[in-house]
Every structure is written in C-alpha cells, then in structure tokens.
Image (spheres, grey):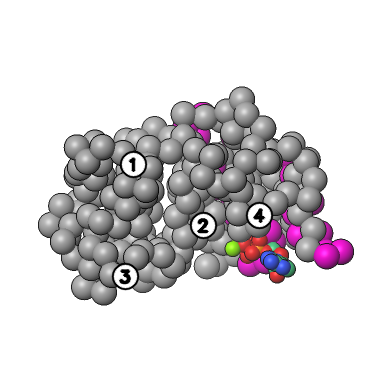
Amino acid sequence: MASVRLKSVSKRFGTTVVVDDVTLDIADREFLVLVGPSGCGKSTTLRMIAGLEEASGGDIFIGDRRVNDLGPKDRDIAMVFQNYALYPHMNVYDNMAFGLKMRSMPRAEIDQRVNEAAEILGLGPLLKRKPKEMSGGQRQRAALGRAIVRHPAVFLMDEPLSNLDAKLRVQTRTEIVKLHERVATTMIYVTHDQIEAMTMGHRIVVMKDGVVQQVASPQEVYDHPANQFVAGFIGSPT
Ligand code: ADP
Ligand code: MG
C-alpha cells in the first residue's frame, strides 16, 4: 500500500520538454487516470514513476521513499502494457510464476499466489495454455495476472485495453475497476480515451503538451472543465 507523489517532475529529450513541471499527489488505494491526446507525455510520466525513464528534474516518492535513484525492481510497482509482453514459450501459469521464481519465493507461496490471481481473473481453465493459444482478451487477463501475483503497492497501466475490440474493451474496463477494488492497491492508469477515463477514475488528470491542465473527479471535470482544451477534449467523440 502506498501513496505516490510527483513534485515538479520534468522530462526532456534533448532540448524538447515532454513532461513539464508535473506535481501530483496520489492517495493510497486511489484509482487515478492520466488522460490526454497522443504524444502529450502520459507514457513518459508513467515510465518515470516506474523507473524505466529517468526524470530530468523533480522528485518522485512512493510511500515515504524518494525513488528517483531506485531501479524499477526496487520500487514495489507492477506495470501492465498494451502489448501484454507475455513470454511466448511459457504457459499462463509459468508466465505468472516466473517473476516470483526469480525472487526465489518458495514454491508453495508461488502456487498460492498464482491460484489466487487465477481465481480473481477467471484464468483457472487457461493456466496450461500458451499465449498463442489464447484470444487477445485472455492474454490481457494473463498479463494482469502476472502483475497482481507480485502484490505490488502500486499498479501502473499504460493503455492496457487498446489492443482489444470495442465490446471487450468495455467489459475489461469493468473488470479492472473490480480488480482494483479487490486487490486494494494504488492505481495509475493511462489512456487517451476520455470515456475510459471518465468511467474508471476516482480522479482524472488531463494533460496537454506535457502540462497538467486539470486534476479533479470525473464529475467535476465534466461540470467545470478548467479551460477550453479540457472542455473540447472531454466532449469530443472517441
Ligand atoms: P503519450 O503516451 O501521451 O502518447 P509519450 O509520453 O509517449 O506520449 O510521448 C511524449 C512525447 O515525447 C512525444 O512527443 C514523443 O514523441 C516524445 N518521446 C517519447 N519518448 C521519447 C524518446 N525516447 N526520445 C525522444 N522523444 C521521445
Ligand atoms: Mg503512450
């Protein structure tokens, strides 16, 4: 369990500023959605929280620890990407167990965690399948399973539904919200889809060109958009 704090975080690639002085306070167990058009700096922000990208300036805290100098493995986070990144030669059970084996966790505990995740996600019947023997939606659930077996303090998800068809996307949205309630971790969820943001987040952060435009509940954003950009973005069809 942990809060996440960003204090004046920036990222430059060369001379281009892609994340500009972002300050955010994410509460323990909150479901926060980062939303904005393609290229606005969502993934870069998430990758800095994950430790996959170094911040050019500012401080990142997870719980009480400043994590800027810690590698991804030491940050107590799990990240789920849009392309799933499952190991193709391993079945679902081994995909979920792999990271835990690497940490020399006892076999019985691995088994217990994998079975718990399988139960939460309805993956029981699929444990012996390899990724190529599953649908896109099933693979995405396996990728979620691989993240939750780690019992991370913070979940980071980067457009995890964008490879799914429209119907499955709506269904999986609901599953992720339920999953979040069940595992009770802090969630930072990135999407370019404003409907997804409005339906999933406790609060949403609207970004444009690396700059935060508004941080508020979906209702507040809807009723009182901070500026013309937010109003236009939230009101636009997907
Ligand atoms: P989003 O996830 O909102 O679509 P990104 O965070 O991926 O946006 O990218 C923000 C900006 O930073 C984009 O203009 C992108 O081209 C640029 N960018 C991302 N990664 C790199 C990189 N490794 N080198 C140079 N520019 C990058
Ligand atoms: Mg992105």
Q: Is mark 3 within 8 Å of ligand 2?
A: no
Q: Which residue is mark 2?
A: 158
Mark 2 vs mark 4: give the one in front. Answer: 4
Q: Which residues are magenta?
A: 14-41
Give the structural element (helix, strand or loop) at label 3.
loop
Residue drawn at point x = 68 percent, y = 41 percent: 69
Q: Earlier in the sequence, mark 2 or mark 1?
A: 1
Would you call the spot at circle 2 few (<14 residues within 10 Å), some (14-19), or many (20 or more)? Answer: many
Residue type pointed to by label 3:
Pro
Q: Position of residue 167 (x, y in %)?
A: 32, 66
Q: CA distance from mark 2 to mark 1?
A: 28 Å
| Label number found at residue 104 | 1
Marked residue nearer the N-terminal end (2 or 4): 4
| Ligand 1 image position (quadrant) | bottom right
Label 4: state its secondary structure: loop
Asked if ligand 2 lies within 8 A of label 2, the reply is yes
Residue type indicated by callout 1: Ser
Q: Mark 1 or 4 closer to N-term?
A: 4
Q: Where's residue 67, x and y in %? A: 64, 37
In the visual, does 127 lie left or right of 233?
Answer: left
Asked if residue 27 is among those painted magenta in the image, a careful observer would answer yes
Q: Which residue: 54% across, 39% down? A: 75
User: Mark 3 or mark 2: which is in front?
Assistant: 3
Q: Earlier in the sequence, mark 3 or mark 1?
A: 3
Q: Which residue is mark 3?
A: 88
C-alpha span from label 2 to label 4: 14 Å
Q: Are marks 1 and 4 in contact (CB under 8 Å)?
A: no
Asked whether disc 3 touches disc 2, contact meaning CB atoms under 8 Å apart, the reply is no
Give the camera-side residue of 17 and 233.
17
